[in-house]
Amino acid sequence: MNLFDLPENKLKELEIKAVEARKLVISTLLEAGSGHSAGPLGMADIFTAFYFHILNHNPKDPDWDDRDRLILSNGHICPIRYVSMAQSGYFPIEELKTLRKINSRLQGHPHRGALPGVETTSGPLGEGISQAIGIALSGKLDKKEFHVYCITSDGEHQEGNTWEAIMFAGKNKLENLTVVLDRNNIQIDGTTEAVMPLEPLADKYKSFNWHVIEVDGNNIMRFVDAVREARAVSEKPTIIIANTIPGMGVDFMENDFRWHGKPPNENEAKLALQELRTLQGKIESEY
Amino acid sequence: MLNPHLELNQDIFNSDVEKTPTRDGFGKGITELGDIDNNIVVLSADLTESTRADEFAKKFPERFFQVGVAEQNMAAIAAGLGVTGKTAFISSYATFSPGKNWETIRTTIAYNNANVKIAGHHSGIATGPDGATHQATEDIAITRVWPNMDVLVPCDSIEASKATIAIGKTTRPAYIRFTRDKSPIITTVKTPFEIGKMQTFWVSENPQATIFATGYMLYYALVAAKELEESNIQTLVVNVATIKPLDKVLTLTLAKQTGAFVTIEDHQVTGGLGSAIAELTSKNYPVPIEFIGLQDTFAESGDPQELRVKYKMDTQNIIEAVKKVIKRKK
């Protein structure tokens, strides 16, 4: 079976995992009392696909030399990374309650030195693709087979450093690098196109000598197909522009930029969990 | 007299003393490291020849990465290499790296604890005619403030080569500072070198003050000490090649022994060597200190020697500072 073949039963399993992940994001953020809601919910499907299907990794041996690397550039969506890591066995689910609290391994923005499995320290925007490039170069020098994935936000494409990195990866034909752009159209101050327009993103990447794929980032099957295509490309890095719905799965958070940077309160969390328990309307709520 | 145990250059006080820029030692150091360690990689931001990375680039093209004029990208790519088994040197002018890319280094190298060495060139007013935009005079202050980061300033091109090799053999992040202008050769290949160890280059029987100098300014400190001795003022001159971690033991021993300090650096007097020494002594054994360096001002274009005179960092200023600090002793 091809690494990326996704039979119907496995797909269903991943979809259920993603809903579970969203519930854990809500309860984790409620407990933390601060943090970002929209991005983690919007990226739950992609993180689930990575941790339970795409990545060649070993949660029991996070420093394994040949693991695929998943670099998170927009560190502020780390709650979903922590949730996926806990779900896949890097640490106990219970530990999610320590997010953003003193003496925790789960820093408000992820720190490599704090938690095994976090590949780089991130939070300040625009630095992730560059670090992923360094790791990809190292892999090539050592003739390693691992693939480097980097998750970025659309907002951080306003950082100059992001374009410095895109230029470098195109020049150096880093086919062992795949960047996933979370195109959810929102940032702290409003929509990206109002704050500082980014379009046409696909054309920009093409002109920098990247292979470009656009995909529905909340459709696990299509996303896995996109990664399969990326892995088949040679002589070019690939950008997967993943169109996601910020706040996905929680009706009152979806597509509302005000949910970019805040956590739910108790009442909002209750409403969100009720909605998620119906698997987005697919089953009846237990309430 | 020159410390007889350190195998120093005995021609140091001759008018025809050999002079080379410390950046030459960097070039030699990384090339030697490249020979002995396959994991050494070097990145340049369009300043390959000027920062002396060209020989490495020619000899090890597969381990040399040209990033173009993009210092933030250079730092973060190096961080990625540094967390994946490589020892990455990034080489540029210090005003740009670690200047322009300060936060990138803070997050991806210092906090991330990545095995990256930042080579900052064209430091100090010794950069001369290019003017204050290219004279890095705050780089020690902005690098020694980072946790996890070693900070080194070699005094001549021979020590520069040794220091480059020494940091290349550690896995810690480090900043190392070089100068553009030719400066006198003070040490020899036999002079010992160790990260974190100060060395007393000028010794005397009854020293009344200690002069701490970092980088090429050590030469002017030695000339001042010699002249002072001729007028019966005895001093010690200490080479501070490592500003972080600072050699606390020797500093405090000399505070007790001599009771007065002068610090010398081609850098702002705030935040650099002088500040590091003052922070240490004020907590443990306060002594009067005079600070030679830029006094909260930007310099300008000019010949480096003319600039040292104008900005009061010349031999004569050191002599006056020593006399003043001795008078301040209780």
Image (tube, coloured by chain):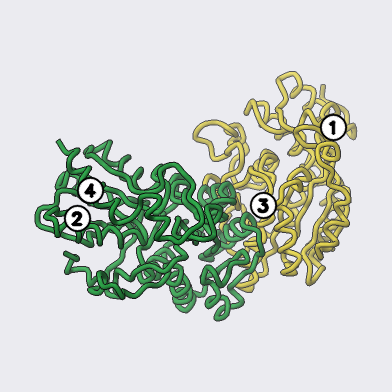
Give the camera-side residue of A51 and B7. B7
| Among numbered discs 4 and 2, the one appearing first in the sequence | 2
Upstream in sequence: badge 3 or badge 1: 3
The residue lying at 80 percent from left, 57 percent from top is A239
**To which quarter of the image does residue A253 belong?**
top right
* Both labels 4 and 1 in a single chain: no
Hue used for the chain lettered B:
green
Q: Are marks 2 and 1 in contact (CB under 8 Å)?
A: no
Instruction: Name the chain under label 1.
Output: A
C-alpha distance separating marks 4 and 3: 50 Å
Q: Are marks 4 and 1 in contact (CB under 8 Å)?
A: no
- Specify the label residue B322 is tagged with: 4
Outermost residue, left side? B205
Foreground tag (4 vs 2)? 4
For residue A175, above or below residue B329: below
Quadrant for the C terminus of chain B in the image: top left
**C-alpha span from label 2 to label 1:** 70 Å
**Residue located 54% across and 47% down the image:** B106
User: Which residue is painted at 55% across and 59% down in the image?
Assistant: B83
Q: Is residue B321 left or right of residue A27?
A: left
Chain letter, disc 3 residue = A
Q: Chain of mark 2?
A: B
Camera-side mark, 2 or 1: 2
Kind of residue sitting beneath label 1: Glu
Mark 4–mark 1 distance (CA, rounded to whole Å): 70 Å
Depth check: B271 or A39 in front?
A: B271
- State the CA–CA distance, disc 4 to disc 2: 11 Å
Q: CA distance from mark 3 to mark 1?
A: 26 Å
- Label 4 amino acid? Val
